[in-house]
Structure formats: C-alpha cells, structure tokens
Image: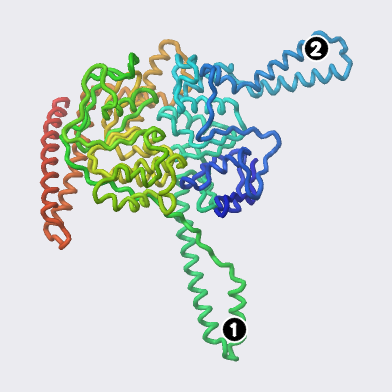
Amino acid sequence: MISINSLTVAYGGFTLLDDINFHISETDKVGLVGKNGAGKSTILKLICGLQHPTSGKIAYPTGLKIGYLPQIMEHHRGRSVLDETMTAFAELFDMEEEIERITEQLSTRTDYESQEYQDLIIRLNEVNDALSYNREDAPEVLAERTLRGLGFKKEELSRPTETFSQGWNMRIELAKILLSKPDVLLLDEPTNHLDIESIEWLEGYLRDYRGSLVLISHDRKFLDNVTNRTVEIMLGHIHDYKVPYSKYLELRKERLAQQQAAFMNQQRMIEKTEEFIEKFRYKPTKSNQVQSRVKQLEKLERIEVDMEDKSALAVKFPPAPRSGDIVYKATDMTLGYGSKVVFSGANIEVKRGEKVALVGRNGEGKTTLMRAIMKELYPMQGESWVGYNVNIGYYAQNQEDVLNKEDTVFETLDRIAVGDIRTKLRDILAAFLFKGEDIDKKVAVLSGGERARLAMAKLILTPYNLLALDEPTNHMDIRSKDILKQALKAYDGTLIIVSHDRDFLDGLVDKLYEFRDGKVREHLGGVMEFLERRKLESLNELERSAAENTVVNEVKEEKKAQAVQEYQERKYVSKEERKVRNRVSFLEKQIGELEEKMKAIETVLANPGKDDDVMELTRDYLELKRDLDAKTEEWAEVSEKLEAFE
C-alpha cells in the first residue's frame, strides 16, 4: 500500500534517517519505536506529505485516504464538542447533497433518452453505492459512541470545545480521524492524554480497525495489544520485525547476539588467514595457497555489527530522610475551584514507604489532589494535612508553566542547587542525557521528552521523602520509562503518582485511589487487580441496565457469563473484609522486604570491610528494626480482624 524507498533525511551535517526502506501493507499494524529524537515523528510527517525527504521517495496508490494525529495540533473553536466531531462526516453530507441535486434534476427533466440523463442516473447510482458502503449507523450515533468511548460524558457533548483542555481537544481530533475511516491511520502518541478506560476503549477500536496503522507510543501494553509488527529506528537505520513489541525485544536480543557471534567467528577466520599469508608470503612452494587465501579475503563479505544506541538515563534517587508514620491524610475532604466541586467526602491516608497511584478519568480530581498536597489549594470542607518532617519533591504535569523557558538546561539546575551538589551538576545532567552543547540549550527549544528528563533531574538534587509525580512518563521513551520505574521501585521513601500507563504502574504501586463521579475510592493491591475488579463492576452495572430494557451490544455473552459468575462468587465478601485481606497481604510483603534488608546489613556487619561505615549501618539497621516491629504489630492486629471474618 505504502512503499518507502531509499529515504534519507539530513539536517546540515547530521543524518537523521539514512537510506531506509520498508513497505506498509493493507493489514499491517506497525509500532514505530526508538529513542526520543530517533526520527519516529519525522517518518509520519513524511508519509502524510508535511515534510519532504533529502532524497528517496514514498509511493502511494491513487486515492489513498490518510488520517494523521500529531503530538501537537491546532484545535478548532466556536463549535460544540458534538458539532465539531460531526465535521468528520463532511464527505458523507456532500454525497447526500449531491444525491438531492441529482434527484431534483431527474424529476424536472424529460429528455429520458439523452446521454446527459443517462450520465445523471449512473452518477446517482455511484454516489448511492458509495454512501451505502461508508455509512453504518446514523452519524450522530457514531459520533456520540466514539466520544463516549474516549471519555466524554453525555452532558459534555454540547459544551464549546474552547472550554476543554488541550488534552480533551486532542480526543475530539482523534474522534474525527477515527470516524472519517481513513485507509491508513498515523497516530503519534495518542495515549498521552487518555485515561486508562479510554486507552482500553481505543485498544479495542484499533484491534478491530480494518485499515493500516502506524503507531508511535511509549505504552508497552498498548503496543502489544494493538500492533502485529514493530519497526525500530536506531541511529538512522531501521530494523523490521513482524511481531508485537514484547516479542520484538526477544528477537532483537537474539539477532544482536547471533550477529555478534558471527562477527567474532569471522574475525578469527580473517586473523588466521592473514597469519598464514604473512607467514608463507615469500615461500615459493606456498605461493598458490597464499594467492588463493588473498583472493578469498578480497571476496569475503564482511559481517557488520549493528551499532546499538546504549545511552540511557541513570536515575538513582538519594536516600529518603525519615518522616512521620502518616505522610499525608485527608478526612471528609471536598476540593474544587471557586463554587465548582471536583470531588467530595474523600478519606485518604498515605503511610510512610507506601507507593500509591491516583487513577481515573481526566478531570475527576487527580491533579487537584496533588495541588492540595502541595498546599496550592485548600479544602472547601474537611481536612488535608501533610505529616511530620515530610519534604515533598513535586513533578508537575504542566512542565510548560513550571520550567522557565528563558533559562538554559544548566541554569535550571544551578538556580536551585546548594552546597557540594553544585560541583556535580554536569554529571547529573549527563545521567539524564544532557551532554556537551545540550546543557546550553534554552528550555524553550527542548522537546517534550527533554523537558520531562530535566524536571526529573531537579528531583535528584534534594533528598525528598515524598515524591509526588503527576504524569512523569508523558513523552518519555520506553527505555527511559523502564529505568525510571526501577529507580522508583528502589526508592525508600513514599511515592504518590498520577499515571495512565498500566505497564509502568504494574509492580510499582501497592495501593490505588480511584477518582470517579465526584468520589474517591481506595483500592488495595496492584493496578492489574484494580482493572480486573473494575471490569467486574462494569459488567454488573450492565446486568442491571439490561434488566431495565437497555440493550447491551458490546458485551459478548460468553465473557459476560464467566465474569458474572466470578462476581457472584466474590460479591458475598464484604468491602471491609476485602480491605482487611488486602492490608494483610500488603503488610506481609512489606515485612518480607524489611527482613531482607536487615539480613543484608547483618551480613556486612558480621564481616565489615575497611570502607564500611559500621555506625551508619547500625543506625540503618535499628531504623529498619523499628519499622519491622511497627508493621509486625499492625499485622497481628489486622490478622485478628481477619480471623473474626472467618
């Protein structure tokens, strides 16, 4: 369908894409992957003609319809959400108007035998056929269904587009592209402004989508669930794998290992051949063999090892100073802006060492709670307080507003660094991939990924004991996200994080607060358990709706029956009992981790080396022991409650 032939893109002396070739067929769903700045977005712009290559060409079939969603776009104003979305059907409405015009002409003409009359009938049939082929349900129904799937509430569809944030306007543009039914979809990080439920809806839509898809995303699960092919861009070259992302990682590792082994074998063979040539070069009796070996080397096709871009973040958060046991608490809290209430009656408690995620639909209050934690916003009702000796490191979602655009990268850190850390600023920036001339760049010219890295670098300068991170992974490539995730798992302080990235949250957090319909609900356990519970609750709601004669078309009977059965088996467990069980599991996990840390210190103290600080290790050990005693005592109390249920 689309053929990319010998494509090169160069800027001055720098070659971004070097003689790349690949083909996109009608059934391909391609995940375009690579580091930030590798050229992924450039390829999408080249395909849709917004940018031109230095050399090479892109071939398309005639009449190919392309739908392109860029990372940053201009949003239309002056219409309601639904009216703006309905512009996606402009072509259908034009067809309807043409049918009306032709029908009116046919009704007034009497030259039935003329060629013009016959041409009108032929054209009428053509337009009717095209309209029948492209139309399924009524446009209003399709538009509303798509907007609801992307997270809009029914009452929001009549609101003007300018009253919504950039992220919500991006959803409107995405809805328009999906509804226009292009032959090829080009999506550049479509999940950046979507909540988990909308991401899952979009996954389902793209899985069933019949056209070609080229997708840029840093969401590993999204790529795995949607794509069937992975094209990697690395150092200007591409490597094509006919598999989804996770399988690509395995095959890539195997390919590089095989390539390295073949290269080493060939190098050994070359070395031995050259030794033979050098040894017998001047012996007449061996001249034929020497000449044969020389020709053999000349004809040899040399194996080249693909250069791998191994530059990556080196994130390690400093040890967290000890805080009080309760890090943050809210009681019957209502938050909002002016007279508008965002959520009410919230009871939230975050203890020292917990890693907590805030999840839910955009606009339900996750960032609002972050502002309350930072004391930028105060409750309309109830209480909100931060615990004793809590020092907060805050990563705001809107880096555009937080970072000074006129500062350079170096000045951004230099303004807040104090003490000995000032001598290490260049090393810290290098760890976040700002090297050489990069540190003198103005913040205004940095990409989204670079700003995210710079904001994260600021958090390394001070030993915080609470990290409050609002969408820290937006614009980060997959490798950077993996490294950040491991750093946060190793961080010994408390973490409160807003994220819609299921893969990033999986294994990182052990408690979630869900923001939905103006309320905040606590869920103990990981993100995958939470998603499973939400699916069951949704199915139960659908069951009730069906009883009220609401038709449920999207739930397959077999899956529904299985999920409802599981729900029936579990629904008799009370909410309080589930909460107690989850708390027991959480405490057992924490106790196990503390015991492992204490064993490691005991091993060092039993045979300390000359560089080991015995006093510091002893202090750490005693602090861990205090934590262990407190959690063991709580575990005993909670276990008694659990026995009472049984």
SS label for mark 2: helix
What residue is shown at x 12% (from left), y 38% (from top)? 632
- Structural distance between the alpha carbons of marks 1 and 2: 90 Å
In the image: residue 411, left or right of residue 218: left
Q: Nearer the viewer, mark 1 or mark 2?
A: 2
In the image: residue 295, left or right of residue 590: right
Could you tell me the amino acid type at mark 2?
Leu
Image position, residue 178 (x, y; %): 55, 28
Relative to the observer, which residue lies in front, 477 or 442? 442
Image position, residue 199 (x, y; %): 44, 31
Image position, residue 508 (x, y; %): 30, 39
Image position, residue 625 (x, y; %): 11, 44
Q: Earlier in the sequence, mark 1 or mark 2?
A: 2
SS label for mark 1: helix
Quick check: 339 above or below 7?
A: above
In the image: residue 626, left or right of residue 33: left
Residue 528 visible in the picture: no
Residue farthest to the top, as pictured: 108
Picture disc at residue 106: 2
Picture disc at residue 611: none
What residue is shown at x 60% (from left), y 75% (from top)? 296
What residue is shown at x 25% (from left), y 36% (from top)? 392
Residue farthest to the bottom, as pictured: 284
Quick check: 382 above or below 250?
A: above
Could you tell me the amino acid type at mark 1?
Gln
Relative to the observer, which residue lies in front, 83 or 399? 399
Is the residue marked by circle 1 packed among few (<14), some (14-19), or many (20+) residues within 10 Å? some
Residue 455 visible in the picture: yes
Q: Are marks 1 and 2 in contact (CB under 8 Å)?
A: no
The C terminus lies in quadrant: top left
What residue is shown at x 36% (from left), y 43% (from top)? 412
**Residue position marked by numbered label 1 in the rendering:** 289
